[in-house]
Image: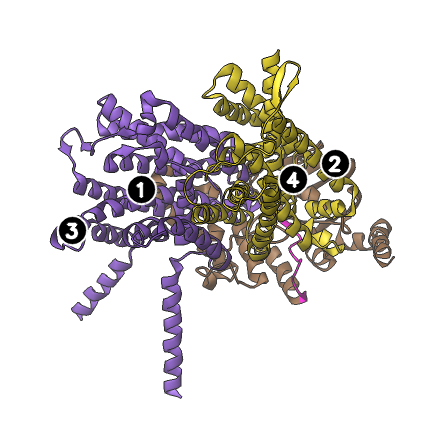
Amino acid sequence: MNKVKTQLNFKALFKNPYVQFILFGLVLSTLPLLSIQFSFIKSAYITTVGVALIYAIAALGLNLLLGWSGLISLGTAGFMGLASYISAYLTVDMGLPFEVALLAAILVPTFIGILVGLVSLKIEGLYLAIATLAVSEILRKTFEEFDQFTGAFSGKSAKFPQLFGMFQLDRGSTYWLIVFILILVMLITYNMVNGQIGRALNAMRGSEAAAQAMGVNLLKYRLVAFALATIFASVAGVLYVHFIRYSYPSSWTLKLSLDFLAMIVIGGLRSIYGTVLGAFIVFAVPDLFLKQIPYFSQLSYTLNGILIILVIMFYPNGIVMIFKDIRLWVLKLLKKGDRNHVK
Amino acid sequence: MSTFVQILLRSLESGSVYALAALGIIVIYRTSNITNFAQGAVGMFNTYVVTFLVIQAGFPLWLAILGGVGTAILMGFTIDYLVIRHTKKVSPVAKQIITLGLIMVVLGLAPMFFGVDPLNLPRLIPDGNVNILGANLSYNGLFNIVFGFTLMFILFYILQNTKVGLAVRTTASNEYTARLMGVPTKTVTLGAWALAAVLGLLAGVMIAPTTSVNLNLMDVVQVNALIACVFGGFQTFYGPILGAYIIGISRNMLLYYYDSVWGGQILYVLILIFLIFRPYGLIGKKVVKKV
Amino acid sequence: MLNENEVLKIEHLSIQFGGLKAVDDLSFSIRKNEIYGLIGPNGAGKTTVFNCITQFYKPNKGTIEFRLKNGGSTNLVDHKVHEIIRLGLVRTFQNVELIRELSVLDNVMIGAHIDFKASMLEQALKLPRARKEEKALREEAEEILRRLDIYDRKDMLVWGQPYGILKKVELARTLMCRPSLIILDEPAAGLNDVETLQLAQLIRRIRDKFDCSVLLVEHDMRLVMDVCDRICAISFGRFLAEGSAKEIQVNPLVQEAYLGSKEEEHA
């Protein structure tokens, strides 16, 4: 009797979303250990998976904006790049601690983002896409031309982070930092989308009129969504530059912003795990497995584009729904089998 | 004085390029209710086709351009027929995402067909200059300006004074009513996508000789054309054109007289500030939404 | 100024679009705990009046005085559209504006948007205050669903629910803010006779149980005549008549407006 009860409790525990997030994080953090144990997991995989997870952080922000709020930004890569340069400049050139650089690298892009949002979000959501496109052009030019700050085309280098001025991280431990922050961001996103903020964003996307009638200040919540997207992108930018330890203008093009879009649309709009899945599909899978096939790096871009269009047209909730759909389908088949059996 | 005229003439040339691209965007926006972010990418691809026909197949340029017009029309048809037509129930935001997906498709396909090296497209009129008020302008530049104006004049004449134009305008003002009134809205939309692709190609062919034909050929054009639409207002056909020429002129003026590196970026900031005061653009009016 | 027993008073309301006067010098007032009907033939400007009250449109002229919960009053024209609900005035929509991707309960919770006191940071970190608040309001929403007999559907998606249920969910959403005046935009549209009858009962029940007034903007005469205490008829944006259902039914001006429009339809 007692045994059954503990079993049930275990089941309930695993159903708790917070426990699931933490378990997910634990699974991800085994990668560096595995790469020591098993030779077929190359240590280069850590870099690829780490970058995919960093992209997933920025993509989660974009998902808050596009998936939940129905607004498009083409500035994700630009803001991410800006944060990476700021953090590199502050830690390397100014010798400031990592934590201070992180804070500054979040505040500056977010401030710019809010200014852009104030101008473009007053009228209609559509204007944000165009305004952020203009901003990403301005930022791209800045990265290329403002060489005291960005090192122009030769890029800007940075070091692995040093936490609290004491703990110097290496690649493996920076990877763990990335996993930790990703899980934190997932938790925060989960809390927000399942509460008042998430409902307001949902209402705004579903019906602007109803949202307003229920007291949702459209400008405020559009700004909130865009600011969150910028904050997440900035965090990702800081992690990127301290993990890869380089930032080039060519890393932050419109192409990357479109990749973020692909991640969330293909992975699953309004799905937290879908976003991470999307980051793997769009970035990690081609990089790990498909790069060997000739022409593939170009073709993968085309495929992502086609996948975006197909998903929007035929499977609007994204690939993450496949698991659920397959389960439903299997259950249906089983049920049918049962009924036949009874007959 | 002559420098000023020189810059003005150059600006009219780049203004024509932006205006053609902007017209393509606005035609699609008004008939399909989609902000087409892939306008530049499609134009880039077809400019590659023209360049390829000239360099690899040895076509004369005019014939190559005709070939490019052909593939542009084909591409426009394909996009509408295979994708856009089936998105009636999809939200406007999702439609925009589709055009962003189209950019990815085109950006991935172009290098497979045409390689990764930048190519050079010759000018339509190879040499010769004309002197206007002490300013030098190439025959080719003059041709571009005149061609841009003429083409837009013809298109506006068709839009305002012919049955086809009426069908387009009715579709633009209310697609549903237009269909009830017997306007073949599907054909109008199909035509709009083809027209937009051709306009994109022409913009590409005009700008290509000044740089090289590469994947980023139309990036600046695309951004400026979209901003021209915002600046001029999405509600009329001529607002974005006006916006495009103003952007062309002020961009070059800023680049020459103010700062040769940051002029273009400063212009974007100025336009963003302008929108604070006139959020619906130069010509645009506030639209009362029905609740 | 508002009289003692009035919750809403519209005076000399006018709005025009282009050259067209959609509402022209309209005045009427609604009393406490009253179900008030605003009727008129198609295109009479009913929905425009409605949108002026809720500030989706800004009227060109006129005042809309509204009784606040503390007993004072305010001119609605001075408020932004998203502030209206905070005053205790809430609306429904002609075509049911619900969020398809959310559950019934979450849709009702959107109506509690203004009741949240916890800051965004508290919510992001799910601090105790945010958690308590969410739980309390969720229970309140469940209670409302129970009262409207749709509690068993609370966890279902709104998408795919029958029309009658959707109307109830929208009503439930308006009740979350404890309104003093609910305005319903053509609630009978799309309902059959039986459903309309049930709706009439429901509206009365809501008025009694939730202690509020109801303004009904309606094209459907069955519902209006059945449920309204007083009715105001308008035509082409102008005031025609005001009175009880019986008075309105026999009023020659109203008959002419309705029959006149019928004749035009036939022509």
Q: CA distance from mark 2 to mark 4?
A: 15 Å
Which numbered disc covers residue C16? 2
What tint does the image give chain C? brown
In the rendered view, tell whether residue A148 sits above or below residue B186: above
* Tags 3 and 2 both on a single chain: no
Q: CA distance from mark 1 to mark 3?
A: 38 Å
What tint does the image give chain B? yellow
3 or 2: mark nearer the eye: 3
Name the foreground residue: A163 vs C146.
A163
Residue kind at label 4, given as amino acid type: Ile
* Tags 4 and 3 both on a single chain: no
Tag 1 subunit: C
C212 vs C238, left or right, is left
Residue kind at label 1, given as amino acid type: Leu
In the image, residue C187 lies in the stretch drawn in magenta: yes
Q: Residue at x 29, y 53 (%)?
A: A292
Q: CA distance from mark 2 to mark 1?
A: 49 Å
Residue furthest out toward the left: A37
Name the foreground residue: C3 vs A226.
A226
Residue C51 seen in the figure: yes
Question: What residue did someone put label 3 on?
Answer: A35
Question: What residue did someone put label 1 on?
Answer: C127
Q: Quadrant of residue A55?
A: top left
Tag 4 subunit: C
Q: Quadrant of residue A37?
A: bottom left
Residue C72 seen in the figure: no
What tint does the image give chain A? purple
Q: Secondary structure at mark 3?
A: helix
Q: Quadrant of residue B28?
A: top right
Q: Which residues are magenta?
A: C184-193
Label located before the other in sequence (2 or 1): 2
